[in-house]
Image (cartoon, coloured by chain):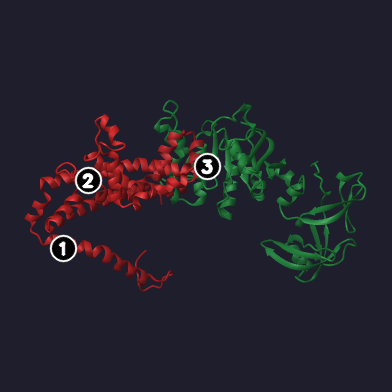
Chain colours: A green, B red
Amino acid sequence: MSIEIDHVNKHFRDFVAVDNVSLTFRDGELTALLGPSGSGKTTLLRIIAGLEQPDTGRIRFHGEDTTDLHVSERGVGFVFQHYALFKHMTVFQNVAYGLTVRPRKTRPSKDEIKQKVMRLLELVQLDWTAHRYPHQLSGGQRQRIALARALAVEPKVLLLDEPFGALDAKVRAELRRWLRRLHDDIHVTSVFVTHDQEEALEVSDRVVVMNKGRVEQDGSPEDVYDHPANPFVYQFLGNVNLFHARVHDGIARIGDIQLPAPEFQGYKNEQGQAYVRPHEIEVFAGREHADALHAKIELVSVVGPTVRLELRTDNSEELIHAELTKHRFRALGLAQGGDAWIRPTYSRVFLPDERVSNG
Amino acid sequence: MPVTLAKRRVIPGFGLTMGFTLLYMGLVFLIPVGAFLLYTTTMSWETFWNAISQRQVVASYKLSFGGSLIAATINLVFGGLVAWVLVRYKFPGKRMVDALVDLPFALPTAVAGIALVTLYASTGWVGQYLDIFGIRIAYTQLGVVIALTYIGLPFVVRTVQPVLEDLEAELEEASASLGADRLTTIRRVIFPALFPALLTGYALAFARALGEYGSVVFISGNLPFRTEITPLLIVAKAEQYDYHGAAAIGTVMLVAAFLMLLIINGLQWWASRRHG
C-alpha cells in the first residue's frame, strides 16, 4: 500500500511544524524520516497515522483519500517511542487487543485470536512472555511486543515513532537489524522516524531528510550520504570539515590543492565552501605532496579500530577533524603535538546562499 | 527493604524519623484508641452486648454504614467525573472549580449542615420545589445521604486527578490506532488504570462519611429508628454520662470500619499489583 502526502501543512500557533510537504512512499518500502528535533518528522508521521489533522493538504493510501478518516479506521499500525503498552494487561492481552476490540461480527473466534497472537509472539521471538506483564520485560522486549501488537491488526502501513529512541546503544543496534530482517519478511509499507543518521542509513530503503518542516533531501541511503543536496544534509549526516574554496571551470581549489568539481563547469572564480568528511582527508607524516597543508596535531583519540585526529592548519581558525585506521596511524608514527600534512581527497563545494540540486 | 539498624544507610536519619513517627503515632493515635479499647474491656460482656444490640442502635448502624456506602458510591461516580473534567478540558473558571472542590475540607461541617437544611427544608430554596413532587430531603434518610455525599466529595476527585494527569496520552492513541472506539478505550484502557485511585478515593470518602457528625445532625432531624446516625448516638450517650454505652458502640464502629478499610485496601493492592 503506497502512501501519498500531498502538499501537507501543519502549524501549532506560531510554529510551523510541517511546511508544504509532498512525498510518496512506495508499496513495501521501509522509509526513514530523518531530522533533528523540531524538524516536523514526528508531526508528519502522526498526520499520516491520523493522530493529527493537517491544516491543509491530503493524505492518500493507495490513491484513496484518508485525510478525514479517524485513526481507528485508517488501518495503520503505530509504534510509540515509549512503547505505550497497556500495563494492566498481559503481553498476550496486549497483542490481542486490536482483535478483541473489533465489533462482534468481524471479531475472530477465541481460538483464532489465540493462534494469531502466538504466531506474532513467535515472530518477535517472545512467545515465552505471553503471560507476563509489560513491567516484567526489558525495554527492547517491550518494543518488540508493541510491534507485535501493531501487526496484529494487519495494518496497511506500519508507522514507527523513534522506535529505538529509549533503548541503550547495543540493544538499539540489534533491534534495528532485526527490524530490517522482519521488514524483508513481511513487506508492509513502513515509515519510521529517527534523529539518528546511522540508524536511518543502516535500516531503510530510502531516507527523507527533514529540517524546519521541509524535506531537504529524499533518496536512497547511499545517495543521501554520498551526494548530500545541501550543506544542511551534509552536516547532519556526519562530521564534516569546512574549507574556503575557489571554484573555477570545474575545479575547486583549497589552497594549492585542486579537486574536481564537475558541477561547476563554466563557473569563473567563485568563492565557496568545500565540505570534506573526516575520512576523506589524507594524513601524512612528511611533506610528500607539494600541495599538502601543514598542520599541528592537537588531539589524538583512539575509538576502537579508528583514530580521530584534531588538527590545526597554519592559516585556519577552525579545527580540522581527520579519521584514519589505527593501523595507518601507527605506520605513520604520528603523535599528539607533532606535525602532519593533510590533503582532502574529495570535497563537495557549495556556493554561498545557493542550493545545489543533486545530480 | 529489610530493616537492619546496624548497617549504614545512604539516607541518614532513620533512627530519628522512625522514632518521631512512633512517638507521633503513639501520642495522637495509638494511645487514645488503646485507652478507648481498654476502657471497653472494663465492662462485662453482657453490658457490652446490651449496649450495642439495642434496636435503636442497630437501626443507626444500618443508616450509618448504608448511608456512607451510598454516599461514597455517588462520590465515586461524580468525583471521577469532576476529576475527568478538571484534567481533560479547558474552560473559563476551571481554577475556581478546582479550588471549590476542597471547600468541604475547610468549611466547618456545622455550617454545611445548616446550609443544607436551609436549602432542602420543605420551605427552603430547593426543598419547596421538590416538595411539590413529594420528595422530602430534610429530616429524612435521603438528607443524611446528601450531607455525607457533600463532605466526601473532595476525596475521589483528589485521588483520581493526579493519576489521570499522569496517564500517557499515548495509551489512548495506541488504543485508537488498534481500532478501538472511544468508549472501548475508556472501558478497557483508561478505567483499569484509574481503578486503584478510584478505590482509594472510595475508601477515604466512605471512612470520612462514617465518622461524620456535624453536618448530618442538622439535616437529619435525629428521629429515633429513622434518621439517627451512630456517631450521634455515641455523643448522646456520652452526654448522659453513659460512657460505657458510648465506648461499646464506638468499638463496634471502630472494628467495622477497620475491617471494611482492610477489604478495600486489599482490593486496591490486588488491582495495583499488576501495574508494577
- For label 2, the residue is B65
Amino acid, disc 3: Leu
Percent position of residue A22, x then y: 69, 35
| Callout 3 crowding tier (Cα within 10 Å): few <14, some 14–19, many ≥20 | many
For label 2, the SS is helix
The chain that hosts pointer 2 is B
Image depth: mark 1 or mark 3 in front? 1
Tell me how far mark 2 sits from mark 3, CA to CA.
49 Å
Q: Which mark is residue B38?
A: 1
Image depth: mark 2 or mark 3 in front? 2
* First in sequence: mark 2 vs mark 1: 1
The chain that hosts pointer 1 is B
Q: Report whether residue B106 is seen.
A: yes
Instruction: Name the residue: 30% across, 51% down.
Output: B265
- For label 3, the residue is A147
Report whether A223 appears left or right of B10: right
| Callout 1 crowding tier (Cα within 10 Å): few <14, some 14–19, many ≥20 | few
Tell me how far mark 2 sits from mark 1, CA to CA.
25 Å
For label 1, the SS is helix
Percent position of residue A302, x then y: 69, 64
For label 3, the SS is helix
Q: Which mark is residue B98?
A: none
The answer to whether the residue labelled 2 contacts the one labelled 3, judged by CB atoms less than 8 Å apart, is no
